[in-house]
Amino acid sequence: MTQKPNSRCAQLWPLQPFPRIRPGDDLAALIARALAHMSLALCPGDVLVVAQKVISKSEGRIVRLDSVRPSDHALELARRTRKDPRLVELILQESTEVVRVGVQVIVVEHRLGFVVANAGIDQSNVSDDGGEEEALLLPINPDRSARLLRDDLSALTTVSCGVIINDSWGRAWRRGVVGQAIGVAGMQSVVDLRGRRDLNGRELKATDVAQADELAAAGSMLMGQADEGTPVVLIRGFVASGPDGDSRALLRPRSEDLFR
């Protein structure tokens, strides 16, 4: 197929092999090793999409459920949702507001500002033995985690790339999960296209592009959701527009939130 002169063409590589991550692991060194194994080198403008799970694991955000003592509120919600009371307690501790409640789901406003099911707490691929007695929380500050990883990679490779920490979440009115950015460094999260013209010369009035989420979703396709074991994806050829941003730019203010 003939490519138009001004069109963009992105390339994506899932970095393999990548080991199972444990608390304290040096992610930057492991990423650099995986790049070298694949005969790849970071280039200016590259973006690395990194699964939240490996960030949380390396930062020790693993909680043993037998260490959790459910509150009365957690016990009540557990009865309504049929969830483990200990998980419910962790959800409440990680949240500022319970937005909706259903069977096996508690939609909350996370302490980071995201509205997400079950506070983003995960139990899949957490324990090395496959048990369900541990839960993985989101990073304390995903934007800071992205910045630190970017800085560490820059020190190792002398190249400053974009870093997106992604997680797979559901969306209002849509089925299925999609990769979304929860931490961003080295690129703009949202691009404001207001004032630009469409093909017919009509001025755009209300068009914001969540480019960090778009790249997070692209990376998520190659990461998979089960036993693929590919938590890092290199994206090349997509020029991430604008100055450095963060994930908070992706949050809709409560005054504009028509769903709540």
Image: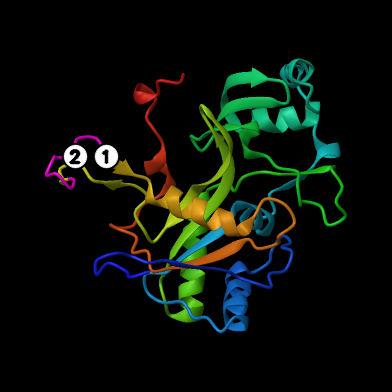
Q: Are marks 1 and 2 in contact (CB under 8 Å)?
A: yes
Q: Secondary structure at mark 1?
A: loop
The relative height of residue 236 versus residue 105 in the rendered view (above or below) is below
Q: Quick one: 165 or 196, which is closer to the camera?
A: 196
Horizontal arrangement in the rendering, residue 123 relative to residue 213 (left or right): right
**How dense is the environment of label 2, judged by Cα within 10 Å: few (below 14), some, or many (20 and up)?**
some
Q: Relative to residue 73, is residue 174 depicted above or below?
A: below
Q: Main secondary structure of the magenta part?
A: loop
| Circle 2 SS class | loop
Count of numbered circles in the view: 2
x then y, percent, for residue 186: 39, 61
Residue 143 in sight from this viewpoint: no
* Residue marked by disc 1: 207
Residue 204 has which mark?
2
Looking at the picture, tell me which residue is in the foreground, 65 or 224.
224
- Name the residue at 41% across, 36% down: 251
Q: Which residues are magenta?
A: 198-206
Q: 69 or 227, which is in the foreground? A: 227
**Residue 10 appears at what percent x and percent y?**
41, 66
Q: Is residue 81 above or below residue 199?
A: above
Residue found at x 62% / y 39%: 120
Residue drawn at 51 percent across, 71 percent down: 152
Tell me the quarter of the picture where residue 229 sits: bottom right
